Amino acid sequence: MNSSWQLDPKIAEIIAKAQDLEGIDEAEAVLLLRLDLYSKEVYAAMETAQRISRQLFGDKGENHFHIGVNVEPCPCNCRFCSLAKNMNIFQNPIEFKEEEIVNWALRAEQQGADAVNIMTTGTFKLERLMEIARMLSMHVSIPLVANTRDISHKEGEKLLKAGFVGFYHALRLGEGRDTPFSVNKRIKTIGVIKDVGLLWMNCVEPVGPEHTPEEIAHLMVLARSYGATYSGVMRRINFPGSPFESCGMISERELARMVGVSRLVMGCIPKAHCTHEPHSASLMAGANLFFPEVGASPRDKMEDTEKGRGTSIEKCRRIFTEMGWNPDLPSNCFQAIVQTSAARDSFAGFSGS
């Protein structure tokens, strides 16, 4: 074999460890994130990441349909968010009509989406979010995932009772610097989510060129240590007027490398691995989960991202199919819930003789 194809011994050791589904540690992740992006070692890491995803997830391509139910000039003023009040992109609060939200969810179910994520801005009333969940539960049987503010145990229990089975929540890059939220509070909410029995959904986000490998690797390892149902990587999108326009954005190629490293970190823990926005490169690096989008989006200047940056389920399905992932297989993320529900239904229908 040509010696030029041999991997750096240290990198080969890290990849072999990941191949055995042990996960890799923070220092090892940093080393992979610092490699020359065009090196054979990066391609080897990405190939291994894809292989272990297919080993654990089969060839399932997951679509978790995002519905942003309200547009608001949000007073939280997260610096990476187009909905921030001080960005002056959106002037008036809007809540999409119930009929529209139901129709979006029905369309998602009909087109084979695996979940519906309901996103709200930071000051949206939790009671209203629960009303929306109860309403949707009357029309669709697709799993519901909440994406909202930090919550208490009591609020988490209410969300579960209202029909949510999962909760998307990330400790963001630049938390406490680019957001008004404390790191400790965000981590506390992860504990709440798991304590009350909601599935914790996560992503390392929003990644920009200014973030260091150490910052990024730390959040990758946090996702594994708290047992995320899925994790992955989302790049920051610079909307018009973004404070980060001068920083630029990472490329899809760099995003794919990060997705691959994150997948090696996660080992056998996750049920899926995500990337955002939908694209093909990360599907060669262990990603198998996309987020088609409608309604409000923190990355868009349009009130309804379906008319802007949002990617449709149909397009996501095409990308999956082109890359050898099958969106028609059953979701891996909600198997335990489906099995529990089936057992409960079976017991309810049992009559002794």
Image (cartoon, rainbow, N blue to C red):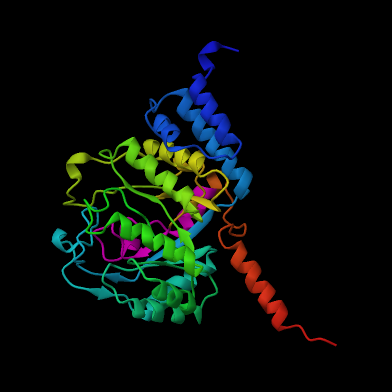
Residue 90 x %, y %: 19, 65
Q: In the rendered image, which quarter contains the N terminus?
A: top right
Foreground of the two, 207 or 142: 207
As drawn, is 121 to the left or to the right of 262?
Answer: left
Tally the marks: 0
Foreground of the two, 326 or 17: 17
Q: Residue at x 28, y 49 (%)?
A: 237
Does 308 appear in magenta?
A: yes
Q: Quadrant of residue 92?
A: bottom left
Q: Say if 108 sits above or below 201 in the image.
A: below
As drawn, is 348 to the left or to the right of 84?
Answer: right
Residue 280 x %, y %: 46, 43
Foreground of the two, 62 or 346: 346
Q: Residue at x 65, y 67 (%)?
A: 339
Does 316 appear in magenta?
A: yes
User: Which residues fall within the magenta stretch?
Assistant: 292-320
